[in-house]
Amino acid sequence: GAVVSQHPSWVICKSGTSVKIECRSLDFQATTMFWYRQFPKQSLMLMATSNEGSKATYEQGVEKDKFLINHASLTLSTLTVTSAHPEDSSFYICSARPPTGEPNTEAFFGQGTRLTVV
Amino acid sequence: AQKITQTQPGMFVQEKEAVTLDCTYDTSDQSYGLFWYKQPSSGEMIFLIYQGSYDEQNATEGRYSLNFQKARKSANLVISASQLGDSAMYFCAMREAGYGNNRLAFGKGNQVVVIP
């Protein structure tokens, strides 16, 4: 099946620094990718929809300047957490699905990135 | 309004027994898809099974089956012959055809612990 690769799988950074997380679709082109955030023992909350060649669409309450999303190619979307603070510590996970147009096409997820800001 | 509801508390299941995880959904669309994912402690999201709103038969994938009751808007997951490796969080999700970009809406999840 299709594979989505996310990197890094974990990162520890100092407060005030920025962290970039990459999400790649390895064997299909994804015009749309999704970024989720998950706190411990909670569900996945959609942060934003990444659109190739255009601006990302952010969910209500998500700071655009804090979470920069770039979707420069059909196989790569990046999420940059700018000026990270301890409250940004969380599990971030991306997803994409092949653009077949069929509703039963599953969304493929990256492995997730566990961010710890100290 | 919450689109996917999973309200069961954490569950302990005896190995080799079956377990049913409840999921109800809310939509006004006629065309939609329902998904179940497994999330082990490593964090990855593993696709288990899919049910389309127009599918007349309940979906099955190996030990996983989906009890789809459209009128009740429920899509319960049944795991038969539980194994220790089934211990994980399980998420029900829905994709609505009319929902922008076909994104998924997730429930809060069910914690399952399989005991020997």
Image (cartoon, rainbow, N blue to C red):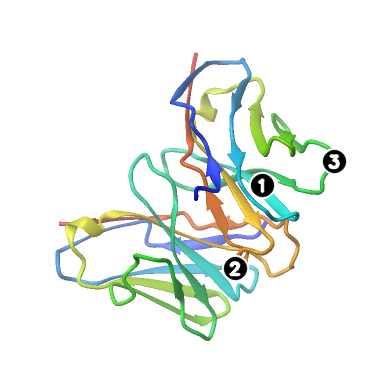
Question: Which residue is identified by label 2?
Answer: B100
Question: Which residue is identified by label 3?
Answer: B56
Q: Is residue B27 above or below residue B98?
A: above
Residue at 15% over, 63% down: A14
Circle 3 SS class: loop
Per the model, the C-alpha gap separating discs 2 and 3 is 26 Å
On the same chain: label 3 and label 1? yes
Q: Position of residue A111 (x, y in %)?
A: 46, 54
Mark 2 belongs to which amino acid? Gly
Q: Work out whether mark 2 precedes mark 1 in sequence or the reverse, and give the earlier one.
A: 1
Q: Position of residue B17 (x, y in %)?
A: 61, 15
> Disc 2 or disc 1, which is closer to the eye?
2
Question: In the rendered view, does B80 fall on the left or right side of A14?
Answer: right
Mark 2, Cα crowd under 10 Å, few <14 / some 14-19 / many 20+, is few
Q: Which mark is residue B34?
A: 1
Residue at 59% over, 60% down: A3
Q: How many marks?
A: 3
Question: In the rendered view, does A86 fall on the left or right side of B33?
Answer: left
Q: Quarter holding the C terminus of chain A?
A: bottom left
Q: Work out whether mark 3 precedes mark 1 in sequence or the reverse, and give the earlier one.
A: 1
Mark 1 belongs to which amino acid? Leu
Q: Which mark is residue A77?
A: none
* Chain letter belonging to callout 1: B
